[in-house]
Amino acid sequence: MKPHGPIPPGFAADAEGMLLVGGMRADALAEAAGDTPLFVYDSAMLGARVAEWRAAMPAGVQLHYAMKANPYTPLLIHMARQVDGLDVASGGELKAALASGMAAEHISFAGPGKRDRELEAAIRAGVTLNLESAGEATRALAIAARTGITPRLAVRVNPDFDLKGSGMKMGGGAKPFGVDAADVPALVRRLLGLGADWRGFHIFAGSQALDAAAIAETQAQTVALAARLANQIGATPPLVNLGGGMGVPYFPGDRAVDVAAVGRALGETLATRDAVLGGSRFAMELGRWLVAEAGVYLTRIVDRKVSHGETFLVTDGGLHHQLAASGNFGTVIRRNYPIAVANRFGAGPAETVSVVGCLCTPLDRLGDQVGLPRADVGDLVVLFQAGAYGASASPAAFLGQGPAREMLV
Ligand SMILES: *Cc1c(COP(=O)(O)O)cnc(C)c1O
């Protein structure tokens, strides 16, 4: 038997052992949605997450939602009401963010390869562009000159360090993201000289880190880097976007981030910051930490079979909706996500089974030799930590099974 990741706290079953999501039975949710597979996002858990972050962080630090973690429209609208800003990474996300109710001045647009029409849409809307290169800056300035609009421009910095223990490194060394720190002062001086509305720095060093000390150290380095650059430029950045990096426990042995410790350390870092940042505001941008835990992915068992002594539960879901749980989205070694039988939630393991999806590929494994209560055709298998990088980050068109249903409750 192989272990699976920790079931997130906050999920419980009714007296019959049926998993409840947002106070509703999993089977009733599947019926209401019309069928499985189905993602359900719990709006109360999303709100609790935002509240937990605000309680832990120093006053005045802003919370941005990186919407690529989950762009589902009802969820995005729900998040837009609760956070201070949205971070988008494409023209499509920009449209969705503007439609979510978030004011344009609180939306920032990062990401390499922004096309001229995307730059123009952002400039016309009054969204802040986080510039990824000198070339992108030149194109944005040309569009600004042509349209006669003063653009809101921030510079994404490729820092000289990365976030230790992070699952996905976004800074340190040669990267497609951001402007190398050494080249930033000259670029910002050029922006200022041309009359752009310089909004500050965006410094994102990594993702999916669980160790509060590593996150705190990276934030201290980030603030120090922002101060050094600001002193070289001779101007105070209005906003320093510190990135995020707070991860969630997906795998056996993973522990949740100590958010209070991150907040305490950030408070000390900001209290002792260089005078050049005295008038700066600070923001963190978070994706998965805000939304992963509030989501479950519900699938139904279609077949139960034994092959060479291994029992397979074949579900109607799969990697076309939950690529990450299958181990094919940025992981080196496949390990089991938190998984359970939704209609026997809380029951102890009775057998070792492999849970697979309905795609005709050996990659489509949602649970590898996990211990679960006995489950049969018609029962519901649930995967947790499914609120981020699920439906929108999986190849839904693969093998023609179609997209999953989604609902916010
Ligand atoms: C993806 C991304 C995020 C969100 O990362 P999470 O791990 O989901 O928190 C934040 N900022 C930028 C620039 C990103 O590309």
Image (spheres, rainbow, N blue to C red):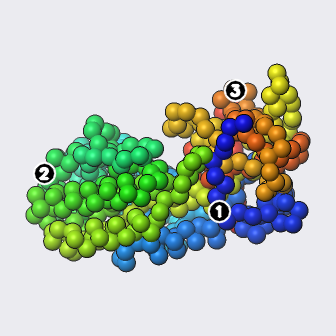
Specify the label residue 79 is tagged with: none
Q: Cβ of disc 2 within 8 Å of ligand 1?
A: no
Quadrant into which the C terminus falls = bottom right
Amino acid at the residue labelled 2: Ala
Quarter of the figure with residue 395: top right
User: Going by the picture, which residue comes out furthest to the bottom?
Assistant: 59
Separation of marks 1 and 3 at Cα, in angstroms: 33 Å
Asked if residue 356 is positioned above or below residue 42 in the image, the reply reads: above
Task: Classify mark 1: residues with Cα within 10 Å, few (<14), some (14-19) or many (20+).
Answer: few
Q: Residue at x 29, y 64 (%)?
A: 240
Q: Residue at x 24, y 46 (%)?
A: 160
Q: Are marks 1 and 2 in contact (CB under 8 Å)?
A: no
Earlier sequence position, callout 1 versus callout 2: 1
Q: Which residue is mark 2?
A: 186
The x, y position of residue 162, in whole percent, is 32, 46
Q: Is residue 333 left or right of residue 265?
A: right
Earlier sequence position, callout 3 versus callout 2: 2
Q: Which residue is mark 1?
A: 9
Q: Is residue 292 left or right of residue 219?
A: right
Quadrant into which the N terminus falls = top right
Q: Secondary structure at mark 2?
A: helix
Q: Which residue is mark 3?
A: 361
Amino acid at the residue labelled 3: Thr
Residue 93 showing in the rendered view: no
Task: Classify mark 3: residues with Cα within 10 Å, few (<14), some (14-19) or many (20+).
Answer: few
Nearer the camera: disc 3 or disc 2: 3
